[in-house]
Amino acid sequence: MMVMTDRAAQTTLINAPLQRCVDIVLDFERYPEWAKDVKEAVVRGRDADGRISRVEYRASALGRSTHYTLEYDYSEAPARLSWHLVEGDIMRALNGAYSFVEVDGGTQVFYELDIELVVPLPGFVKRRAEARILIEAVKELKARAES
């Protein structure tokens, strides 16, 4: 089986304060309200400071339902929130981060993602899927933060 791993990134300016953007990203259980591919988000663990550290997701991906659990890293918060895959049914790796920079008129958000799928996919299909995930993620976050 062919292993495919790719890093992709997307950035956008959100017309909202940095803290509002961070608060939305950290409110994992409400993702289904604004991230249309996320069907369910269940908190599975907290760190010593009581922050959510592990979340199990059910989402639609590549035309099917998928389950995966992410572990969050707050070591660079609030400027950056990163995560890595703990377990998943169609991916071997799902690592990423949101980075936030306060700028005039709002917050510059940088979203990076590194996905390694178990399912072999033609390169163009994989790139299209990644682009859609990235573009939708920042677009949906922007819409939520600016509403």
Image: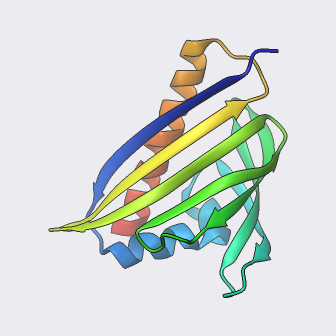
Q: How is the image coloured?
A: rainbow
**Screen quadrant of the C terminus:** bottom left
Quick check: 81 left or right of 110? Answer: right
On the image, the x and y values in percent for residue 115 come to: 63, 36
Report the front residue among 91 and 58: 91
Percent of width and height locating residue 86: 79, 53
Is residue 5 depicted above or below 141 in this figure? above
Q: Is residue 143 visible?
A: no
Left or right of 89 on screen, residue 32: left
Callout count:
0
Residue at (29%, 71%) from the top-left corner?
16
Spot the residue most to the left. Answer: 104
Residue nearest the viewer, comparing 51 with 12: 51
Identified at 60% across, 22% down, the residue is 126
9 relative to 97, above or below: above
Camera sees residue 121? yes
How far across and down, in percent of the image, does residue 62 sit?
69, 30
Quarter residue 74 falls in = bottom right
Q: In x, y percent, where is residue 92?
A: 77, 36
Quadrant in which the N terminus appears = top right
* Residue farthest along the bottom direction in this orientation: 49
Q: Nearer the viewer, residue 95 or 44?
A: 95
